[in-house]
Amino acid sequence: MITSIREACATTPNVRMVVLPELSTIEYSERAFSSLDELAEPLDGESVSAMAELAQDVGVTVVFGMPRISASGRYTISQVALNAQGALIGHYDKVHVAQFGASAEKRWFDRGEHSLVFEADGFRVGVVICYDMRFPTYIHGLVQRHQLDVVLHPVAFTRDGSWPSWPAFVTARALENQVYWLSINRAGCGWGGSMVCPPWVDDEREMLRFDETESLRVVTLSRDAIAHARATYPFREDALADYTPVLSADPT
């Protein structure tokens, strides 16, 4: 994986950030989860060190997924962000742990308790993981509190009953929050389908969708597209700060 990223960055100009899927250092399977005592790592472990060296060598921000073991021995599904100098920006532990369809996480992983937000090339970037997408109050609060422009959404979506609704959730979260939404899945048979949705979709702007092939896909984000969406469709200005009085009023 590291060799492929290094080669792709060497031959592709202007790559500024590499985003990898949920748990990208291991398989997404109960077989792998049952071996977390061997596979989970701390933030000063081998995977972070190897990715830090990669980030520094190619001069890009790297965001990748791994099973993390905390100092207290808790396992979390984590996304780690490293800057272009190889320094740790921070990490995010998945807040909503999935247990339905092909997901089998609650037996093995604890939920996270903090967010991850950072600046990258003039964009405010936040990170959520897979199942987190399905909780609009959480996403809206994260975007509004931290004034995000981009949400990175690494996932492990296989073709179970949750697959058909995935694109609808991606589109809704991007448009209702007026952010770029990058939903990055694992590659290979039964996986794939990664999506990049702009902050507005119309005849000139559409969501990008990819196939199952493992490759580095280059996507350019535009601050003008964010500004256009927010100026044309002023959801943020028109939203009430508190809907409690309306919801509490007796219906007439």
Image (cartoon, rainbow, N blue to C red):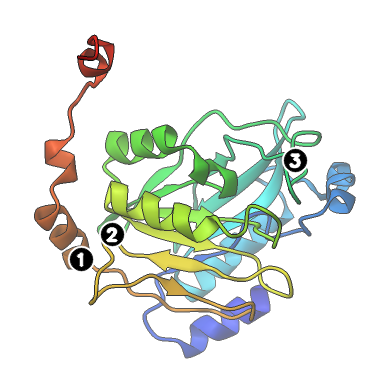
Does dot 2 land on a helix, a strand or a loop?
Answer: loop
* Residue closer to the observer: 133 or 150: 133
Residue 63 picture location, percent across and down: 53, 58
Dot 2 corresponds to which residue? 199
- Residue at x 26% of width, y 42% of height: 147
Instruction: Name the residue type under label 3.
Output: Glu
* Residue closer to the observer: 97 or 27: 97
Which callout, 2 or 1, points at the residue further toward the start of the chain? Answer: 2
Residue 86 picture location, percent across and down: 51, 59
Which callout, 3 or 2, points at the residue further toward the start of the chain? Answer: 3
Labels 2 and 1 touching (C-beta < 8 A): yes
Quadrant where the N terminus is found in the figure: bottom right
- Residue at x 59% of width, y 32% of height: 112
Residue 231 picture location, percent across and down: 10, 55
- Residue at x 30% of width, y 54% of height: 175
- Residue at x 39% of width, y 44% of height: 117
Answer left or right for 26 relative to 34: left
Q: Rounded to the nearest whole Å, what is the CA distance between mark 3 and mark 2?
A: 31 Å
Dot 1 corresponds to which residue? 225
Quadrant where the C terminus is found in the figure: top left
Q: Could you tell me if residue 149 is visible in this image?
A: no
